[in-house]
């Protein structure tokens, strides 16, 4: 049996990723989450660099903490995929293809509160993928992946509470009861 070339291995990986994304698996859904966190890192930096106003320094301190923690989660999620024999997205093209976080260069011109609201929205978007990935991992009998994803969901919810507090809101302000919609799964 001949060894596959690097190009053949990558082509096989892409073919499998395409198949997994058409019939979602826990691994494919978690690949979306890795990509979301790659994009969040970029967006968090953009906000840190361009936030202005009387609370800018406070916002920058919170953003720095979130950036550091997000980077750790980015690695932890990718490591979990690798531990389970999955290949996490690892290129800008893959991140771009798989993320559900919207990027907008014009965000640098938003007022500080609008910038902070984008962070809340991004974590809420990511949570939709995490909750779906948790269910898939449980259905696929992948308890360690489910455990990491549950921990990530808790961290994301904590971030939402922190950023909502910066806006003078409670953690769930502005969110409808999403649990009722997911009961059909």
Image: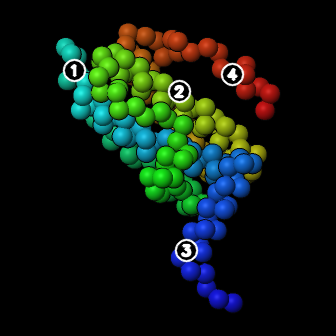
Q: Is residue 25 above or below residue 128?
A: below
Q: Is residue 158 visible?
A: no
Instruction: Mark 1 or mark 4: name the one nearer the start of the chain.
Output: 1
| SS under mark 2 | helix
Mark 1 nearby-residue class (10 Å; few <14, some 14–19, many ≥20): some
Can you identify the residue that label 3 sits on?
Answer: 7
50 or 34: nearer the viewer: 50
Instruction: Mark 2 or mark 1: name the one nearer the start of the chain.
Output: 1
Instruction: Mark 3 or mark 2: name the one nearer the start of the chain.
Output: 3
Mark 2 nearby-residue class (10 Å; few <14, some 14–19, many ≥20): some
Q: CA distance from mark 1 to mark 4?
A: 36 Å
Circles 3 and 4: CB distance less than 8 Å? no
Q: CA distance from mark 4 to mark 2?
A: 13 Å
Between tags 4 and 2, which lies in front? 2
117 or 7: nearer the viewer: 7
Can you identify the residue that label 2 sits on?
Answer: 124
Can you identify the residue that label 4 sits on?
Answer: 179
Can you identify the residue that label 1 sits on?
Answer: 52
Q: Position of residue 147 (x, y in %)?
A: 60, 44
Q: Position of residue 181 (x, y in %)?
A: 73, 22
Instruction: Mark 4 or mark 2: name the one nearer the start of the chain.
Output: 2
Instruction: Mark 3 or mark 4: name the one nearer the start of the chain.
Output: 3
Q: CA distance from mark 1 to mark 3?
A: 47 Å
């Amino acid at each position: 049996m001949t060894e596959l070339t690097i190009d053949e291995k990558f082509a096989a990986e892409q073919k499998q990723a395409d198949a997994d994304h058409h019939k979602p698996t826990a691994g494919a859904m978690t690949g979306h989450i890795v990509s979301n966190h790659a994009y969040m890192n970029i967006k968090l930096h953009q906000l840190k660099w361009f936030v202005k106003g009387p609370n800018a320094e406070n916002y920058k301190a919170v953003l720095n903490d979130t950036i550091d923690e997000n980077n750790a989660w980015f690695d932890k999620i990718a490591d979990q995929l690798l531990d389970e024999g999955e290949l996490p997205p690892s290129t800008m093209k893959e991140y771009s293809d798989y993320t559900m976080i919207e990027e907008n260069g014009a965000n640098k011109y938003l007022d500080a509160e609008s910038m902070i609201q984008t962070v809340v929205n991004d974590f809420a978007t990511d949570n939709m993928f995490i909750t779906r990935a948790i269910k898939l991992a449980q259905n696929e009998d992948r308890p360690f992946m489910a455990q990491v994803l549950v921990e990530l969901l808790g961290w994301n919810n904590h971030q939402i509470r922190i950023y909502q507090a910066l806006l003078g809101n409670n953690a769930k302000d502005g969110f409808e009861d999403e649990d009722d919609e997911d009961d059909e799964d």
